[in-house]
Image (tube, helix red, strand yellow):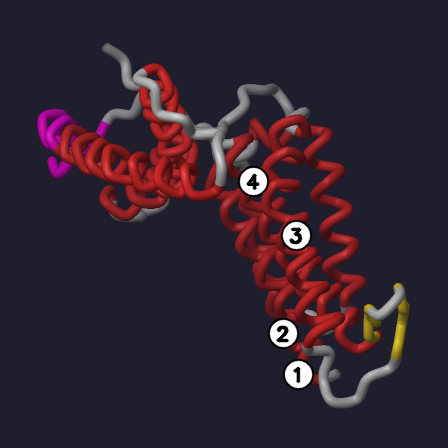
Amino acid sequence: MAEKDTSIYQPGESVLHRLNPVTEIILAVCLSLIVFIAPDYRVALVLAVALFGFVFIARVHNLVLRLYGVVALPFAFFLLLVQGILAPGKKVTPLLSIGPVTIWEQGFVSARLIFLRISVLILAFLLLATTAQPQRIRIALIEKGVPNKLAYVFVASLQIIPEMRDRAQSITEAQQARGLDTKANLRTRLQSITALMAPLLISTLIVANTRALALNARGFEATGQRTFLYDIPDSTGEQALRYIAGGAVIATLAWRIVA
């Protein structure tokens, strides 16, 4: 029986879908480095807007925006609370007052920069996960000389969260069918979480062991020439794009040192 695909990859024919996965990985890493090196929030803002544009170009906006909202909105609220209200810094200037609550300008500026940086990081890797097929990622990494085990770990890290989410949902539905109330008061919900964690962790370990046995049976550690199911093209233009991305990181670092 074929193994269920638990990744968040969305099939498509966009420019991003056709890129070599190594190019997408390097672009995601370089963009993340650039926004964390650059001191100006406008750099992160421009890159975040550009990434949002690519999300729509790749037509993965339904999933990406939903996942981004789940992570980014609570993070933005937490940042505003801590940086803008509770711990704005030593020198403070009121920016906005709503009743007894004051948002301080210095804290807001700091929170804005952190939020935009994290947004670029989230969007870049969500684009990678939704437009690069896991099997193609692994093959592309191996072709570039990455050890087979390391390539598998990288791909597995992209799949583990959606896989555990699906397994947790299945366990929750099974518990509800047996009469466990998972939507009652807070105390009952905490008990439900405890009841969920044990089978979730045990099933995860069982799946990990099953995969290890299957990989060994398929010659995972075999040496010598390998034949892959997918042919991953790597054009000269993409190679140049990767060098440009690396050069942009170096240029941003030099700007940070000089500025």
Give the mark toward the camera: 4 or 1: 4
Q: Mark 3 and mark 1 in contact (Cβ < 8 Å)?
A: no
Image coordinates for residue 136, horizontal then vertical, percent: 40, 30
Q: CA distance from mark 2 to mark 1?
A: 6 Å
* Label 4 environment density (alpha carbons within 10 Å; few <14, some 14–19, many ≥20): many
Magenta span: 213-226
Q: Residues within 10 Å of mark 2 (few under 14, many from 20)?
A: some
> What amino acid type should be assigned to the residue bearing mark 2?
Leu
The alpha-carbon separation of the residues under discs 4 and 1 comes to 30 Å
- Circle nearer the N terminus (4, 3): 3
- Front tag of 4 and 2: 4
Which of disc 2 and disc 3 is earlier in sequence?
3
Mark 1 vs mark 3, CA separation in Å: 24 Å
Of the two numbered discs 4 and 1 on the same chain, state the one appearing first in sequence. 4
Q: In this rendering, would 81 be left or right of 157?
A: right
- In the displayed structure, 259 sits above or below 51; it is below
Q: What's the mark number on residue 257?
A: 1
Query: On the rendered structure, is 188 left or right of 225?
Result: right
* Residue in front for this viewpoint, 112 or 126: 112
Percent of width and height locating residue 210: 15, 29
Q: CA distance from mark 4 to mark 3?
A: 10 Å
Q: Residue at x 88, y 64 (%)?
A: 98
